[in-house]
Image (cartoon, helix red, strand yellow):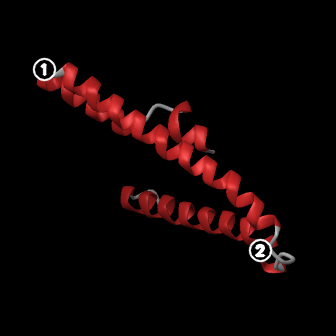
Amino acid sequence: MLGISGGLLPCPSALVVMLSAIALGRVGLGLLMVTAFSLGLAGALSGIGILFIFAGKYIAGLPQRNRLLDYLPAVSALFITVVGLAIAARALAEMGIL
């Protein structure tokens, strides 16, 4: 997941910064800003990955998992699906289709 959020897909923010710099005729500044942005993102993602590695040792020592936590992924997926359907329905209603 960290790879997908941090670099396997083009970052829209970096693209906006670079296109803005090109439009202003400041390509060097745009490259510098995108480089700084990328280094910061790489540092943050690496830190999160290291945090997860060390947190695994502590989580394994916790008492037996709660049964409710077994259903948490399904509940969150259902929530995301419902929100997505609501957003789609609202967009269709605004377009006059629904």
Residue 59 lies, with reference to residue 23, above or below; the image says below
Across and down, in percent, residue 39 comes to: 41, 34
Q: Which mark is residue 14?
A: none
Residue 67 lies, with reference to residue 15, above or below; the image says below
Q: Is residue 69 left or right of residue 19?
A: right
Residue 67 falls in image quadrant: bottom right
Residue 18 falls in image quadrant: top left
Question: Which residue is located at x 51 percent, y 39 percent?
Answer: 6
Question: Which residue is located at x 44 percent, y 41 percent?
Answer: 41
Q: What's the residue type where badge 1 is placed?
A: Gly
Cα–Cα span, label 2 and label 1: 53 Å
Across and down, in percent, residue 61 comes to: 82, 69
Q: Which residue, given by chain and number where applicable, does mark 2 sit on?
A: 69
Q: Is residue 29 left or right of residue 92?
A: left
The extreme right residue here reads 64
Across and down, in percent, residue 22 comes to: 20, 22
Q: What's the residue type where badge 2 is placed?
A: Leu
Residue 87 lies, with reference to residue 11, above or below; the image says below
Q: Which mark is residue 25?
A: 1
Question: Between 9 and 60, which is closer to the camera in this rendering?
Answer: 60
Q: Could you say whether the residue bearing mark 2 is in a helix, strand or loop?
A: helix
Question: Between 41 and 91, which is closer to the camera in this rendering?
Answer: 41
Question: Which residue is located at x 55 percent, y 60 percent?
Answer: 84
